[in-house]
Image (spheres, helix red, strand yellow):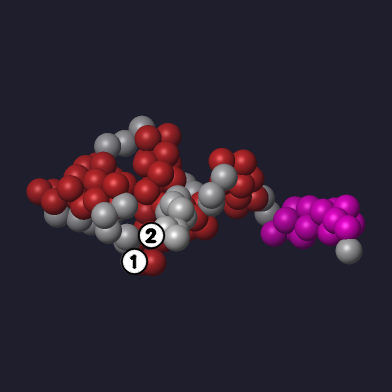
Amino acid sequence: MANKFINPLPFRLKQARTAKGISQKQLGIQLGMEVGSASARMNQYEKGKHTPDYATLKAMADELGVPVAYFFCESQSTAELLCLLDKMSDEDKEDLLEQITKLSPE
């Protein structure tokens, strides 16, 4: 039986990049890629032909203003929640965690 799993990384990368309003080439150049290959490399990541290593993913996330884990969210709502959580202070995250823990069934 074929595995129906779809890697969310290519979609999330493109989503974050377009939300930021920059081209594949611009993002690649901002990440330090060669001008002549920046667009092609980013295109291969967005098409899922190649997967960036963690250091490159971290640089992409920082440049695009999303947490690294965003690239692996399978649902839109989880991706949006993760971005909101990432912007919260540690204290606010602890408070929210406490509230959610009280609500969850054991």
Residue at 56%, 41% in the rendered image: 76
Dot 1 alpha-carbon crowd within 10 angstroms: few under 14, some 14 to 19, many 20 or more: few
- Amino acid type, residue under disc 2 in the picture: Leu
Residues 1 and 17: in front is 1
Disc 2 vs disc 1: Cβ atoms closer than 8 Å? yes
| Residue at numbered disc 2 | 57
Can residue 28 be seen in the rendering of this structure?
no
Q: Is residue 13 above or below residue 97?
A: above
Q: Is residue 103 above or below residue 20?
A: below
**Left or right of 88: which side holds 27?**
left
Residue at 57%, 45% in the rendered image: 75
Residue at 10%, 48% in the rendered image: 36
Q: Residue furthest bottom?
A: 54
Tag shown at residue 53: 1
In x, y percent, where is residue 45? 29, 52
Residues 7 and 58: in front is 7
Magenta residues (range): 90-105
- Amino acid type, residue under disc 1 in the picture: Asp
SS state under label 1: loop
Q: Residue furthest left?
A: 36
Residue 102: say if magenta. yes
In x, y percent, where is residue 100? 82, 54
Q: Residue furthest front?
A: 1
Magenta segment, principal secondary structure? Answer: helix
